[in-house]
Image: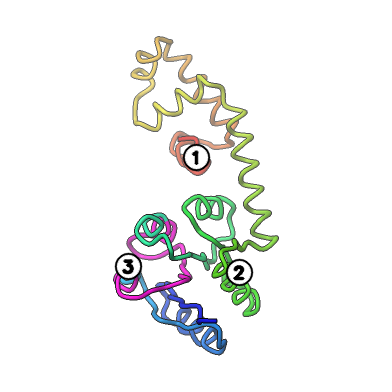
């Protein structure tokens, strides 16, 4: 069987070196490159035939989630595994939606990392029980928020996110400014936020806007 060809992408050199030395011991794997940024990754992908890319989320310039989304169109044969410190459900869900095949937290042990790489190389997805729970939890929150917000609140939310003032929203929806404010207050209560900026941020996280 031919070796699984891997690129490691992380903006921390010490972390990249640690992962590379760990994986290099395994005779089924071949590290063919490393990159500190999306830009350098795409340069490598132009030159090399690659099976797996291990990618962090937080990087300068284009982040890991955007990298996966961009690469899915340009390099559909390359499979991505996220390797990150972010143990939050919304990141897992976004990674999966963008096309990631696996998601691991950086405290994963060597065996788990190698298992994930081999599964993904064989076309399977890899999410351990902890990651699966995060994903399910986040999707449940999304579902609840969709159910909680009324159609009219969703309309107001969209207009708020577009930067319209209360007066402009009221004119557009043919209601009073007070009605718009009531919707805004109700949405903030439902999404458990304190102000409009947090409302927009939370709604974006939940893919409501």
Q: Specify whether 59 is left or right of 147.
A: left
Q: Quadrant of the C terminus?
A: top left
Q: Earlier in the sequence, mark 1 or mark 3?
A: 3
Nearest the eye: 107 or 74: 74
Q: Which residue is mark 2?
A: 119
Q: Residue at x 64, y 77 (%)?
A: 109
Looking at the picture, how far across and down is residue 56, in whole percent? 46, 67
Q: Vertically, is 131 above or below 122? A: above
Q: Vertically, is 162 above or below 7? A: above
Q: Specify whether 142 is left or right of 68.
A: right
Q: CA distance from mark 1 to mark 3?
A: 28 Å
Q: Specify whether 152 is left or right of 161.
A: right
Q: Which residue is mark 1?
A: 207
Nearest the eye: 98 or 157: 98
Q: Earlier in the sequence, mark 3 or mark 2?
A: 3
* Res. 42 mark: 3
Q: Vertically, is 168 above or below 138? A: above
Q: Specify whether 124 is left or right of 157.
A: right
Q: Are marks 1 and 3 in contact (CB under 8 Å)?
A: no
Mark 1, secondary structure of its residue: loop
- Please give the range of residues in magenta: 43-68
Label 2: few (<14), some (14–19) or many (≥20) C-alpha neighbours in 10 Å: some
Q: Residue at x 30, y 67 (%)?
A: 39
Looking at the picture, how far across and down is residue 8, in whole percent? 44, 75
Q: Residue at x 59, y 36 (%)?
A: 192
């Amino acid at each position: 069987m031919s070796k699984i060809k891997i690129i490691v992408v992380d903006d921390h050199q010490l972390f990249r070196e640690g992962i590379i030395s760990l994986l290099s011991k395994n005779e089924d794997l071949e590290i063919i490159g490393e990159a500190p940024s999306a830009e350098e990754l795409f340069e490598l992908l132009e030159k090399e035939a690659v099976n797996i890319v291990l990618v962090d989320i937080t990087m300068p310039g284009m982040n890991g989630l955007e990298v996966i989304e961009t690469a899915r169109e340009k390099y559909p044969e390359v499979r991505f595994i996220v390797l990150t410190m972010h143990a939050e459900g919304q990141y897992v869900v976004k990674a999966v939606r963008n096309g990631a095949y696996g998601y691991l937290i950086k405290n994963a042990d060597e065996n788990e990392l190698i298992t994930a790489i081999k599964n993904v190389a064989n076309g399977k997805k890899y999410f351990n029980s902890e990651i699966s729970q995060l994903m399910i939890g986040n999707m449940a929150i999304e579902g609840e928020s969709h159910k909680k917000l009324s159609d009219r609140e969703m309309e107001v939310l969209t207009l708020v996110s577009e930067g319209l003032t209360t007066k402009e929203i009221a004119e557009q929806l043919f209601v009073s400014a007070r009605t718009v404010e009531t919707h805004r207050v109700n949405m903030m209560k439902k999404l458990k936020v304190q102000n409009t900026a947090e409302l927009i941020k939370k709604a974006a996280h939940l893919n409501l806007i």
